[in-house]
Amino acid sequence: DLAEIERETYPDDLHIPCDMAGYHAALGEVEAGFAELDRVISENPADPVISAKIAETYEDLGDRTRSLEWVERSLRVGVSPEEFEDNPTLRDLVADPQYLELVLGAGTASSTPSKE
């Protein structure tokens, strides 16, 4: 309810619907979470913080494919891999071999140890 009030007060702030998507994910309201992310994405966000939050929220909603897509976008706009690697809720995402490929493909240094 408070987030809805905040959205009405600051309708152009994309952080609010992004946060709301995360709240829906935490409550198990998957469809509502996806709907909020669709609202954010329709605004074509370039903000690195929002890009990283979208990646995290897709993971929270159980959509690894879209999460990895947004990890890649986030890396391209300057988000450091540590933003994902230091987040305990993203351990499974960071352990995914596709994540490491994205980090290496972006030419970004990562603290994730190589599994060779």
Image (spheres, rainbow, N blue to C red):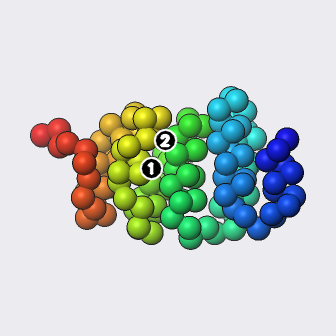
Outermost left residue = 116
* Disc 1 target residue: 68
Give the image quarter of residue 95. Answer: top left
Taking 28 as reference, is 97 above or below it? below
Give the image quarter of residue 62. Answer: top right
Q: Which of 6/23 is in front? A: 6
Tags 2 and 1 touching, CB below 8 Å: yes
Mark 1 secondary-structure assignment: helix
Find residue 86 and name its label: none
Taking 85 as reference, is 49 above or below it? below
Kind of residue at disc 2? Arg
Quarter of the image containing the N terminus?
top right
Q: Position of residue 11 (x, y in %)?
A: 81, 64
Taking 16 as reference, is 95 above or below it? above
* Disc 2 target residue: 64
Kind of residue at disc 1? Leu
Image check: 4 left or right of 81? right
**Residue 7 visible in image:** yes
Residue name at image x 49 percent, y 41 percent: 64
Residue name at image x 12 percent, y 40 percent: 116
